[in-house]
Image: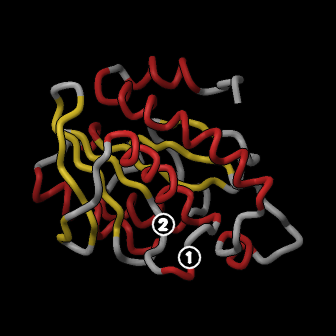
């Protein structure tokens, strides 16, 4: 069973903010399959479905970003999910808008949601799809990540969102090292 988690903050005031890129990317995947997050459990909205003969849970934690690890841990324990079968989709200040990177492990890069996930899973060896939101050093980081996404940046992000369903399908059936080789440095955006 796979667990695909989009990170973000719940609430209308956070819609279309840089920190909710994980939610927005997950929405593209859900739209492709015509599914919705219909269930609520353990402070998260989720659905369980089959893709390519594999059980998959799609999850949006319903707690604030910096408490995402609590929610992920509850799903891992309840559904008996191996750490190697988790993919976290998040924003990344260290990459430009229009860039993304798959990682199989590593530091949180200062991302509070990823820090909390690492804390609650007890490891940094979980897979992630990090979507670039750039970093404007002239604006306080908190204000920047919670700021609305300008139109030109939205267009670049949507190009990535359209690729995410393919990445998810291949994550389900493919070795992650091969997936990273295929998509990291992806140039067709």
Residue 169 in picture, x, y percent from top left:
36, 29
Q: Which dot marks residue 8?
A: 2
Q: Which dot marks residue 14?
A: 1
Q: Quadrant of residue 83?
A: top left
- Picture layout, residue 123 above or below residue 177: below
Name the foreground residue: 97 vs 65.
97
Name the foreground residue: 119 vs 33.
33
Q: Mark 2 and 1 residues: CB-CB less than 8 Å, in contact?
A: yes
- Please indicate whether residue 170 sits to the left or right of residue 73 in the image: right
- Picture layout, residue 167 above or below residue 137: above
Judged from the image, the secondary structure of the residue bearing numbered disc 2 is loop
Residue 48 in picture, x, y percent from top left:
18, 49
Quadrant in which the N terminus appears: top left
Q: Residue at x 72, y 45 (%)?
A: 156
Judged from the image, the secondary structure of the residue bearing numbered disc 1 is helix
Residue 54 in picture, x, y percent from top left:
18, 31
């Amino acid at each position: 069973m796979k667990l695909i988690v989009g990170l973000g903050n719940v609430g209308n005031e956070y819609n279309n903010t840089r920190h909710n890129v994980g939610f927005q990317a997950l929405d593209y995947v859900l739209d492709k399959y015509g599914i919705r997050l219909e269930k609520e459990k353990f402070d998260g909205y989720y659905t369980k479905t089959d893709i390519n003969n594999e059980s998959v849970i799609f999850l949006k934690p319903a707690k604030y970003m910096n408490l995402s690890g609590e929610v992920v841990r509850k799903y891992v324990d309840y559904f008996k999910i191996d750490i190697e079968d988790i993919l976290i989709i998040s924003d990344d200040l260290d990459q430009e808008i229009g860039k993304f990177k798959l990682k199989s492990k590593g530091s949180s890069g200062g991302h509070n949601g990823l820090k909390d996930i690492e804390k609650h899973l007890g490891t940094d060896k979980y897979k992630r799809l990090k979507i670039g939101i750039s970093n404007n050093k002239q604006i306080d980081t908190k204000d920047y990540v919670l700021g609305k996404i300008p139109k030109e940046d939205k267009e670049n992000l949507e190009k990535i969102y359209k690729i995410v369903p393919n990445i998810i399908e291949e994550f389900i059936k493919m070795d992650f090292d091969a997936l990273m080789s295929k998509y990291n440095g992806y140039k067709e955006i």
